[in-house]
C-alpha cells in the first residue's frame, strides 16, 4: 500500500481523494529551453514523499537535479544540464558538459581517467552520459495497492569497425517512497568482443555535504589512487568547510559484501539528520570510487559504484581485469539510491553496515 502524509492508503482510498494521481506524484516529460540546455529532453519525477528528480533522456537517461523536501541532494555544476551536442570527446573535454546531478553514467566501453589503449585515444569517462535515448517511456501503474512510477529507454554506443553496445535502462520509484531503483542491461549487439567498463557517478553536495558531514559504509578496503591522494586517507570519510587550497583526492573502495551480497555507502549530515545512500550488488559492481573535491564552488563528493578501477582502460587491461563482452553477451546492474530521513534512519544504517 502507499504510505503518504502520515498514514497508509489503499488504491481505492487514495483515488477517492484526488482528481488524478499526478496530484500526489508521477512522471512528466518536459523540454529544456534556454542556453546550452535548449532542446534537452527531461522527465520530472515526484514520488510523493518529498523526493523529486529529473531524468534526462537526452543525456543518457541519467539523473540531473534532485531534492528532498526542498533540500538539494546533489551538487550542480555551472555548465547546466546542457544538450549532448556540446560533447567534447578529447582528453578531459567530458567535464565541459558535466552538470553533476544525482547520477551520471560513465561508460560504456571505458570509464575513469583519459588514457591511450592499443593505439586509441580514450576520453575521460566515455560517452555514456552524452548518448540520447530511444524507446523512451515514462508512466505509472498500479500493482495492487502499490503505484509504481517507471522511466524506461535505451541508448547505444556504436561506431563502424568498433564497439556496438546497447544500454537498456529502467528507473523506478514507488509512490510514497524516498528511494529509486536503477536496473541496467548492457549488451554487446555487435559481432566482435568489446571492452565494457561502467561507473555510476553519484554526486552529493550541499547541504548534505557540509562541515561535519561524513561517509558511512559497509566493510571494505580503501586505498588512494595516487601519491597526491595518499595523505588524505586517514580523513577520507570526514569533511570540512570549503577550502580554497583543496586539491581533488580519489580513493578506491574494494567492496567486501554483506551476507546478502550488497554493499552500502551513505553521505550523512547529522546536524540536519539527513543522508543520501547508495546500495550496489558486489558481484556486479565490486568497486566504489570516492571523489573528494571540497574547494569553493567545486564542493562535492563522488560516490561511484563501478565494475572497474578508475585509472582508465589501459590500466584495467594491464592488470588483467578488463571486462570483455562477447558478441551477444550482456551484463545486468542494480543500483539503489535513497534518502535517510532522521537520526533514527541514520543510526540504523550505521548499525547495519559499518
Image: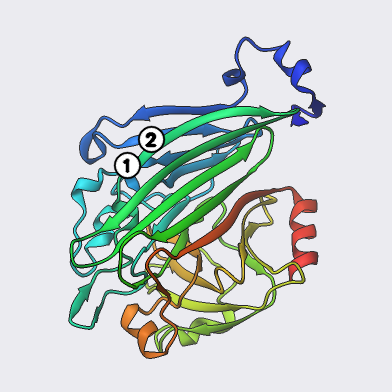
Task: Give the residue at x 69% y 76%.
Answer: 219
Q: Position of residue 64 (x, y in %)?
A: 42, 45
For the point 69% across and 56% down, the residue is: 270
* Horizontal side, residue 1 vs residue 208: left or right: right
Q: Nearer the viewer, residue 50 or 285?
A: 285
Image location (x, y in percent) of residue 189: 35, 59
- 295 vs 59: above or below: below
Q: How many marks?
A: 2
Q: How is the image coloured?
A: rainbow
**Side (left or right) of 329 relative to 141:** left
Q: Is residue 138 above or below residue 23?
A: below
Seen at 55% across and 69% down, the residue is 285
Q: Secondary structure at mark 1?
A: helix
SS of the residue at dot 2?
A: strand
Distance between mark 2 and mark 1 Cα atoms: 7 Å
Mark 2: few, some, or many residues within 10 Å (few <14, many ≥20)?
many
**Residue name at image x 42 percent, y 42 percent:** 153
Residue at numbered disc 2: 42
Q: Which mark is residue 58?
A: 1
Please say if the residues under marks 2 and 1 sit with CB atoms less than 8 Å apart: yes
The mark nearer the N terminus, 2 or 1, is 2
Amino acid at each position: 500500500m502507499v504510505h503518504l502524509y502520515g498514514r497508509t492508503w489503499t488504491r481505492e482510498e487514495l483515488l477517492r481523494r484526488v482528481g488524478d494521481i499526478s496530484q500526489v506524484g508521477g512522471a512528466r516529460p518536459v523540454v529544456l529551453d534556454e542556453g546550452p540546455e535548449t532542446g534537452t529532453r527531461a522527465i520530472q519525477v515526484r514520488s510523493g514523499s518529498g523526493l523529486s528528480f529529473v531524468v534526462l533522456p537526452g543525456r543518457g537517461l541519467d539523473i540531473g537535479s534532485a531534492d528532498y523536501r526542498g533540500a538539494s541532494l546533489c551538487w550542480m555544476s555551472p555548465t547546466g544540464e546542457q544538450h549532448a551536442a556540446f560533447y567534447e570527446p578529447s582528453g578531459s573535454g567530458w567535464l565541459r558538459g558535466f552538470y553533476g546531478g544525482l547520477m551520471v553514467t560513465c561508460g560504456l566501453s571505458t570509464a575513469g581517467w583519459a588514457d591511450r589503449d592499443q593505439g586509441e585515444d580514450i576520453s575521460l569517462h566515455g560517452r555514456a552520459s552524452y548518448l540520447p535515448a530511444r524507446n523512451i517511456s515514462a508512466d505509472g501503474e498500479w500493482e495492487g495497492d502499490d503505484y509504481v512510477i517507471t522511466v524506461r529507454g535505451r541508448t547505444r554506443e556504436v561506431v563502424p569497425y568498433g564497439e556496438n553496445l546497447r544500454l537498456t535502462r529502467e528507473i523506478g520509484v514507488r509512490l510514497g517512497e524516498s528511494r529509486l531503483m536503477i536496473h541496467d542491461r548492457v549488451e554487446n549487439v555487435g559481432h566482435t568482443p568489446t571492452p565494457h567498463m561502467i561507473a555510476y557517478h553519484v554526486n552529493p553536495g550541499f547541504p548534505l555535504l557540509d562541515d561535519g558531514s561524513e561517509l558511512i559504509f559497509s566493510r571494505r578496503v580503501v586505498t588512494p589512487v595516487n601519491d597526491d591522494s595518499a595523505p588524505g586517507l586517514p580523513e577520507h570519510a570526514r569533511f570540512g568547510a570549503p577550502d580554497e587550497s583543496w586539491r581533488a583526492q580519489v580513493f578506491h573502495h574494494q567492496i567486501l559484501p554483506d551476507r546478502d551480497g550488497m554493499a552500502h555507502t551513505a553521505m550523512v549530515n547529522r546536524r540536519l539528520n539527513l543522508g543520501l545512500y547508495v546500495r550496489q550488488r558486489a558481484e556486479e559492481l565490486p568497486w566504489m570510487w570516492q571523489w573528494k573535491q571540497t574547494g569553493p564552488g567545486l564542493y562535492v563528493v563522488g560516490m561511484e559504484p563501478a565494475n572497474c578501477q578508475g585509472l582508465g582502460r589501459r590500466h584495467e587491461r594491464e592488470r588483467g581485469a578488463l571486462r570483455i563482452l562477447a558478441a551477444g553477451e550482456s551484463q545486468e546492474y542494480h543500483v539503489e539510491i535513497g534518502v535517510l530521513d532522521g537520526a533514527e534512519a541514520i543510526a540504523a544504517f550505521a548499525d547495519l553496515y559499518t
